[in-house]
Image (cartoon, rainbow, N blue to C red):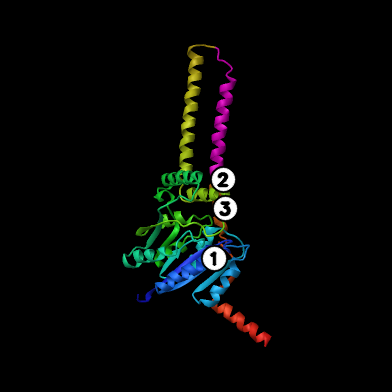
Amino acid sequence: MSKNTNFKLSVIAPMYNEAAGIGVFLRELINVLESAKYNYEIILIDDGSTDETVSNCLPFIQNNPNIRLIVFSRNYGHEIASTAGFDYATGDYVVLMDSDLQHPPQVINELVKMAHIDGFDVVCALRSNREQQSFIKKQTAALFYKLSNKITGFDLKNGNIGNFRLISRKVVESLKLMKESNRHLIMLFAYIGFNTSTVSYAVSPRYAGKSKYSLRKLIKLSLDSIISFSARPLHMMSLLSIFISLLMMVYAGFILMQKLFTHQQLADGMASVIFLISGLFSILFLFLAIISEYISRILIETKNRPLYYVKQDISNDSLTSLVIAEESTSA
């Protein structure tokens, strides 16, 4: 196979406490890229790992000039780590994938073919199996994506498309124009558009460890994805408020007519009054909660803070310089 030197391929792999499996992942990834003779670079983003993830990457960086490691000052989350990868990637095509081996590196060849030969700007890896997820997680994910599809108007394929994908340079540049702090990349990709295709793949088991997405993180990501991409929750609450107000007016008119024309003594009706007041206050507090979510995001975005801070930028050149300096000192 002739060397693919007419384009450069960047592979972005965010990492968080992946010490046990990062070596296996890098060996498999490098083998795929070298076998296909790509002109490539690997951008590793360490999202504030507290284990030996960074040190386990160093031997690979020292032996391969195509690997670069960006180490965050703290844990910023998977979405921000992926965003940093796009900031540092220089390739004509950029692949985003997880480093836990659930995204098989062999799929990269199919993604590249669809983009480079068939001309697609976005090629998504479509999950053909979700057997490894629990029943509850499958059902909650399906419910979330149906709700998101309805509210945002995007087709998210019922959650079978994740962040594993290839995008062209012009899509990368379009993505870099969006600087919001509360990010959901799947939604951002859908918002940007461009001609898109899919490649099916089977999700592999995690090589080691467990998912870093806690329930709290999943709930936050769900809120971000809905609130950041649609004002429909506000519209729905406005319509609900109008509907409730009309019901209250009808009810008040009914009471007034009953009093004027039947001259009946109205019952105390404390239970119904309490029920109505409780219902109205519940709706009011729900409305305030939704408004608060929008306002809090506006506050964060207006501060315009950097999305992340980098503690170390490690490459083959920097490690070589360090070794030379240490040898000179010892001599």
**Magenta-colored span:** 265-291
Residue plotted at (59% across, 21% down): 270
Mark 3 vs mark 1: which is more N-terminal? 1
Q: Which mark is residue 292?
A: 2
Name the element at disc 1.
helix
Name the element at disc 2.
helix
Categorize mark 1 by other alpha carbons within 10 Å: few (<14), some (14-19), many (20+).
many
Residue plotted at (57% across, 80% down): 320
In front of the other: label 3 or label 1? 1
In the rendering, at what x and y percent does residue 224 appear?
Answer: 51, 50
Q: Is residue 135 left or right of residue 112?
A: right
Q: CA distance from mark 3 to mark 2?
A: 10 Å
Q: CA distance from mark 2 to mark 1?
A: 40 Å
Main structural element of the magenta stretch: helix, strand or loop?
helix
In the rendering, at what x and y percent does residue 242 appear?
Answer: 47, 34
Q: Which residue is mark 3?
A: 299
Q: Nearer the viewer, residue 327 or 249?
A: 327
Q: Which amino acid lies under the numbered mark 1 shown in the image of this protein? A: Ile
Q: Nearer the viewer, residue 188 or 125?
A: 125
Q: Which residue is mark 1?
A: 22
